[in-house]
Amino acid sequence: MEIKVVRQIFEWNEDCSNEIKKELKEKKVFMINVMGSPGTGKTSLIVELIKRLSRTYKIAVIEGDIAGQVDAKKIDALGIPVVQLNTDGACHIEAMSIKHVLPYFDLENTDVVFVENIGNLVCPAEFNIGEDIRIAILSVPEGDDKVEKYPLMFSTTDILAINKYDMKEFFDFDDVKVENMAMDLNHNIAIFRISSKSGEGIEKLTDFIKDKIFEKIER
């Protein structure tokens, strides 16, 4: 019985995710699902990407948190449309939640929507939310064993951003090991070594995302 219920949840979520994909395709809106542990730098990376992408594209942000508006206020300070999505204890965002939030934005005048998912490396990877690409962030202080411990997160993402790379000399972090494990799980993954604080690697990551946006909304 329990297996049947779980399957129904996933099938229902997948149907909703496909509806979102269809709507965003019609309106030429590109959605990016940003995932990672608490403190890994999801909001900081989104802010840095907004600074660069907003020169070309109109951007909106859905801030997912269990509670509070701390990160949404940082996005709002940039003058970017933002909606806070509080899950009240749920450890991930589902497609239906995104479907309910999207009408708050003027999608006819939006090119890119960032979704900052709930901070953990497990269940956010299990639910498609209508996104075009996924970014999984792993920060150097977290350790180099996370790909091995949480394979689904890294096998289903399009981009692995190794953040806080400027701190590598202070930690026993083997980035080559991380890269090899990620590539073994996902041959199509694009890996960037970045620092939201120093700006290292952010331009290359931005250019990669620009190419993906161009493929969808400007063809």
Image (cartoon, rainbow, N blue to C red):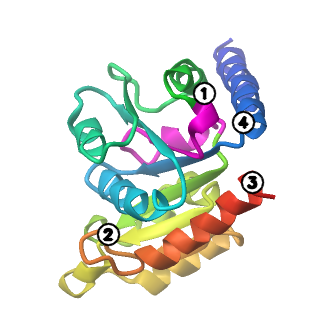
Q: Can the viewer see residue 129 in this picture?
A: no
Residue 86, position as x, y percentages in the image: 35, 24
Q: Label 1 amino acid?
A: Ala
Place residue 80 in its image quadrant: top left
Q: Nearer the viewer, mark 4 or mark 2?
A: 4
Q: Residue at x 37, y 61 (%)?
A: 51
- Where residue 99 sits, quadrant-wise, is top right
* C-alpha gap between disc 4 and disc 2: 40 Å
Q: Residue at x 38, y 22 (%)?
A: 87
Which class describes the residues within 10 Å of circle 4: few (<14), some (14-19), or many (20+)?
A: some
Placement of the C terminus among the 4 image quadrants: bottom right
Q: Label 4 amino acid? A: Lys
Amino acid at dot 2? Gly
Does the CB distance between marks 2 and 3 fall below 8 Å?
no
Image vertical order of residue 206 relative to residue 82, above or below: below
Q: Quadrant of the N terminus?
A: top right
Marks 4 and 3, Cα distance to the nearest angstrom? Answer: 11 Å
- Magenta stretch contains residue 106: no
Q: Please state the extent of the stretch shown in magenta in the rendering.
A: 107-130
> Residue 216 — which label?
3
Q: Which mark is residue 27?
A: 4
Give the labeled residue for mark 1: 95
| Residue receiving disc 2 | 143
Q: Residue 60's spot in the image, x, y percent? A: 47, 40
Q: Secondary structure at mark 1?
A: helix
Closer to viewer: mark 3 or mark 1: 3
Circle 2/circle 1 CB separation < 8 Å: no
Q: Are marks 4 and 3 in contact (CB under 8 Å)?
A: no
Q: Residue furthest right?
A: 219
Q: Residue at x 33, y 22 (%)?
A: 89
Mark 3 or 1 closer to N-term? 1
As drawn, 47 above or below 197: above
